[in-house]
Image (cartoon, helix red, strand yellow):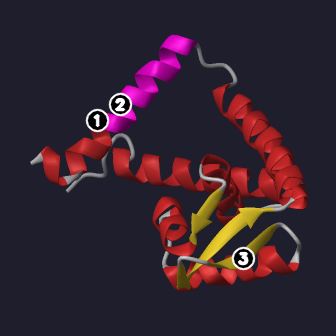
Amino acid sequence: MPAPAIAPIGVVLSRTAKTASRAFDQALAAAGGSQPVWQILISLKTSPVANQRELADAVGIQGATLTHHLNGMETAGLVTRRRDPENRRVHLVELTEDGEALFHRLASAAIAHDKRMRKGLSEAEIATLADLLHRLAENVSNGGH
């Protein structure tokens, strides 16, 4: 079988996603954070007091993994955890002032990264790209059969 004239779209997409993700990791690290911390901070900004189960669901990670990240964030003074007075088995998580400050630094880094990703692309091209990516995702999801 002859080699394909162009790389399969899945290979191109996977390589591009890894490259973009690595660059985003580096941008967040330079601002003092990481992707998991960024996702937790965004979730806490959306829901200022969240329980750990809700937070894990919102971020899309396992409870034990979230606990690991929250332990580090609490030690760094970014979040506080306290028991819910209505259900002592539930821990409520809140941002501290330092957590708010980190959120703003990481938000600036995320915005700059997004601008970097969009460089040289028109708004129409970005809209087309977003549409194509959604269609690719649908093609491989249950709805795409």
Q: Give the alpha-carbon distance from disc 3 to disc 1, as whole Å.
A: 40 Å
Q: Is residue 68 above or below residue 9?
A: below
Residue 9 visible within the image: yes
Q: Is residue 25 left or right of residue 20?
A: right
Report the disc number at residue 81: 3
Main SS of residues in magenta: helix
The quadrant in which the N terminus is found is bottom left
Which residue: 63% across, 82% down? 67
Instruction: Find residue 47 and report its horizontal and vertical position in percent.
Output: 60, 52
Q: Is residue 5 left or right of residue 138?
A: right
Q: Which secondary structure, mark 3? A: strand
Report the disc number at residue 132: 2
Residues shaded magenta = 123-134
Binning the other alpha carbons within 10 Å of mark 3 as few (below 14), some (14 to 19) or many (20 upward) gives some
Q: Give the alpha-carbon distance from disc 2 to disc 3, as whole Å.
A: 41 Å
Q: Is residue 72 above or below residue 100?
A: below
Q: Which residue is mark 1?
A: 135
Q: Nearer the viewer, residue 35 or 139?
A: 35
Which residue: 85% across, 81% down? 75
Among the two numbered marks 3 and 1 on one chain, the one whose residue lies closer to the N terminus: 3
Q: Quadrant of residue 94?
A: bottom right
Instruction: Find residue 10 and report its horizontal and vertical position in percent.
Output: 36, 51
The amino acid type, in three-letter code, at marker 3 is Arg
Instruction: Find residue 6 and report its horizontal and vertical position in percent.
Output: 37, 41
